[in-house]
Amino acid sequence: MADIFTTEHKKRPLVIIAGPTATGKTFTSVELAKRMGGSIISADSMQVYRGMDIGSAKVTEEEMQGISHYLIDVADPSDPWNVVRFQAEAREAAEEICGAGRLPFLVGGTGFYIQALLYGIDFTEMDADTDCRTAMEQEAENGGAQALYQRLQEVDPEAAQAIHPNNVKRIIRALEFAQKSGGLRISEHNRSEHMRAPAYDAVFFVFTMDRAELYQRIDARVDRMMEKGLVEEVKRLKEQGLTAEDVSMQGIGYRQILRALDGEYPMEEAVRLIKRDSRRFAKRQLTWFRRERNVTWIDLDEFSCPEALVDHMEREIRRRLDL
């Protein structure tokens, strides 16, 4: 293992395990890390938040089986977490893992986060606070979020298609970029950044499976979340002062329960919406990863058991990284 960390290698190794929710990424990554002397970096935009455990399906200490996990419970729900912060901290984690002679595994379903680390995307042009951003934030607070989204559809249809209409933060970032760059679309910028050579010697796996079976898994996971106390978790967060305006509370599961608690609809409707939105999110995740380069797709239906899957992936990692 140590040979891959010598100065003869220009790039650090990185194993990426991605794919939609409820496909078993956690179990698989832990088993591989145990076998191959690895540590895991979470590429999940919700598991970073402390106290948001059930709705994020956060990996438990028992599931970790002694394997070090990074970027879990590193932010308060009121903290301004974003892809820029993720990139910086994930890069630092990868260096620390490699420096210890271990193999870093980047695991999760947030495709933009994975891209940010893998390709070293430059966010400096978009990172500074500006007057135009403040003005758009005020417009959104005054009920103009839909108008902002319609404006983005006109300015950058491709970016609008990739951004949820309720994700005000990303809508504003895309509009701001177009203004600051003199008309350059953020989708064009991201595409050019994506064409960079990877910053790591990466083995990139994406899980897929029969769509109907995936949706059944997602529905069952939501039912388990409700049984484990998702409503109580959201109540506690609400009591701490968190609202729908907080980025953390805009995650699937949290926003629907919060609205039910606010009396917008019955809790049964919240559960239905969580399942529906989770299925839609899984579909968007698969669409995102199909645009990725140099991906090894793993059809879970082709493996008789989880151990067979882990055996196959271990062989592929060792072959690709010459371990």
Image (cartoon, grey):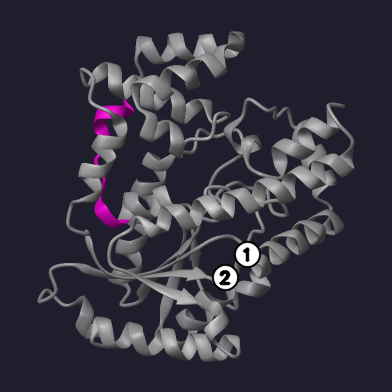
Residue 244 in the image, given as x and y percentages of width and height: 68, 28
Residue 215 in the image, given as x and y percentages of width and height: 68, 62
Q: Is residue 30 magenta?
A: no
Quarter holding residue 268: top right
Q: Report the front residue among 34 and 212.
A: 212
Element type at marker 2? helix
Residue at image location 22% in from the left, 80% down from the top: 4
Q: Amino acid at mark 1?
A: Val
Q: Which quarter of the rendering shows the C terminus?
A: bottom left
Label disc, if present, on residue 90 of the rendered structure: none
Residue 26 in the image, given as x and y percentages of width and height: 57, 70
Disc nearest the viewer among 1 and 2: 2
Q: Is 263 left, or right, of 82 in this rendering? A: right
Label 1–label 2 contact, CB within 8 A: yes
Q: Residues within 10 Å of mark 2 (few under 14, many from 20)?
A: some
Q: Which residue is mark 1?
A: 59
Q: Amino acid at mark 2?
A: Thr
In the image, the segment drawn in magenta is 118-128
Q: Which residue is mark 2?
A: 26
Above or below, comparing residue 69 to residue 46 in the picture: below
Residue 301 in the image, given as x and y percentages of width and height: 57, 80
Residue at image location 50% in from the left, 33% down from the top: 80
Quarter holding residue 206: bottom left
Q: Which quarter of the rendering shows the N terminus?
A: bottom left
Q: Report the front residue among 293 and 65.
A: 293
Element type at marker 1? loop
Above or below, comparing residue 189 to residue 316 in the picture: above
Q: CA distance from mark 1 to mark 2?
A: 7 Å
Q: Residues within 10 Å of mark 1 (few under 14, many from 20)?
A: some
Hey, which residue is sitting farthest left in the picture?
A: 8
Residue at image location 53% in from the left, 85% down from the top: 302
Would residue 199 be seen by someone viewing this image from the given angle?
yes
